[in-house]
């Protein structure tokens, strides 16, 4: 995936979620921003991998 620079993504969360997110980030020595980006990238990979597995299963089943 090519990166053509960064974009701004604003998200409003409640105080409890922000505190939990900041806690998770701190345990990993990361900023909240870096932690959220890592979580989004991991989730995106998991979703793409799952779709690829499903397509492969359909290919070999058919």
Image (spheres, helix red, strand yellow):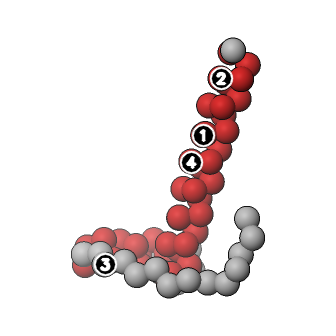
First in residue order: circle 3 vs circle 1: 3
Specify the label residue 12 is tagged with.
Answer: 3
- The picture places residue 44, in percent across and down from the top left corner, at 57, 56
Label 1 crowd (10 A; few <14 / some 14-19 / many >=20): few
Check whether the beta carbons of the residues at disc 1 and disc 4 lie within 8 A of each other.
yes
Q: Mark 3–mark 1 contact, CB under 8 Å? A: no
The CA distance from mark 3 to mark 1 is 29 Å
- Compared with residue 26, is residue 53 higher up or lower down, i.e. above or below? above
Residue 27 visible in the shown view: no
Q: Earlier in the sequence, mark 1 or mark 2?
A: 1
Q: Cα distance, mark 3 to mark 2?
A: 39 Å
Mark 2–mark 4 CB contact (< 8 Å): no
Q: Circle 2 sits on which residue?
A: 58
Q: Which residue is mark 4?
A: 47
Q: Pick whichever of labels 4 and 3 is earlier in the sequence.
A: 3
Q: Could you say whether the residue bearing mark 1 is in a helix, strand or loop?
A: helix
Q: Quadrant of residue 56?
A: top right
The span from disc 2 to disc 4 (Cα, nearest Å) is: 17 Å
Q: CA distance from mark 1 to mark 2?
A: 12 Å
Residue 62 seen anywhere in this rendered image of the structure: yes
Q: Tell me the residue at 56%/48% (across/down).
A: 47
């Amino acid at each position: 995936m090519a990166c053509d620079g960064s974009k701004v993504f604003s998200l409003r969360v409640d105080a409890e979620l922000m505190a939990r997110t900041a806690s998770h980030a701190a345990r990993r020595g990361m900023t909240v921003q870096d932690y959220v980006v890592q979580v989004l990238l991991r989730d995106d990979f998991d979703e793409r991998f799952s779709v690829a597995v499903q397509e492969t299963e359909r290919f070999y089943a058919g």
